[in-house]
Amino acid sequence: EAGVAQSPRYKIIEKRQSVAFWCNPISGHATLYWYQQILGQGPKLLIQFQNNGVVDDSQLPKDRFSAERLKGVDSTLKIQPAKLEDSAVYLCASSLVGGGYQETQYFGPGTRLLVL
Amino acid sequence: AQSVTQLGSHVSVSEGALVLLRCNYSSSVPPYLFWYVQYPNQGLQLLLKYTTGATLVKGINGFEAEFKKSETSFHLTKPSAHMSDAAEYFCAVSELGAQKLVFGQGTRLTINP
């Protein structure tokens, strides 16, 4: 079974530029998550989708971050414009059913973003 | 609100020695607790989880953790460290109705030959 795929793996941009990350979850997984992991910290949930609807985006900086999950499968996370503090690893994860509190999340390898 | 504290951002042990990584949580309702491991340049992988039932949980790669409600702890242990255990370890908590994981800041485990 293929795991969660993410691209690109690395990205370097100048501040105020735009950037987009792509995620393909495990086939059949209804719930998809985007996390931000700043160096030395644990992952922080940015947004959670169930199929193509948003379940939780309370920690997403909506003035610069946006995300979509068309057709309930792939997802794209965008930052526009980027700030220095956005430098982090962006992790995508998926889970099988409804993102329940005890359900295992499966993580992709992440995209490492450096904003200069 | 849920929160997780991992005591020690860096733990170093000798190969063959006991591994103990500490995790304390805060939750207003019975928690569900997880340990994830992250190898360099990889995503997180589930080691083990506690939901209900037996408080001693066994996971992959010889790791286990014990849920102690009275101490609000979920410490991770392994009797004998192996070089391949070197990685970052994250404790996480979720709770009924919350639907999301809250992670600790992580503990980097180094194994000395």
Image (cartoon, coloured by chain):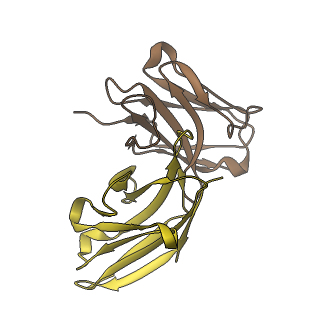
**Residue at the spot x=24%, y=79% of the render?**
B79
Letter of the chain in yellow: B
Q: Is residue A107 visible?
A: no
For residue B31, side relative to residue B34 (left or right): right
The vertical placement of A18 against B106, above or below, is above
Locate residue A98: give its quadrant. top left
For residue A102, side relative to residue A69 (left or right): left
Picture coordinates of residue A97, whole percent (x, y): 39, 28
**Residue at the spot x=54%, y=61% of the render?**
B104
Closest to the observer: A91 or B16? Answer: B16
The vertical placement of A103 against B86, above or below, is above
Picture coordinates of residue B64, whole percent (x, y): 29, 67
The vertical placement of B85 against A24, above or below, is below
**Residue at the spot x=56%, y=19% of the render?**
A53
Picture coordinates of residue B74, whole percent (x, y): 43, 67
The vertical placement of B39 against A85, above or below, is below
**Colour that chain A carries in the picture:** brown
For residue B76, side relative to residue A85 (left or right): left
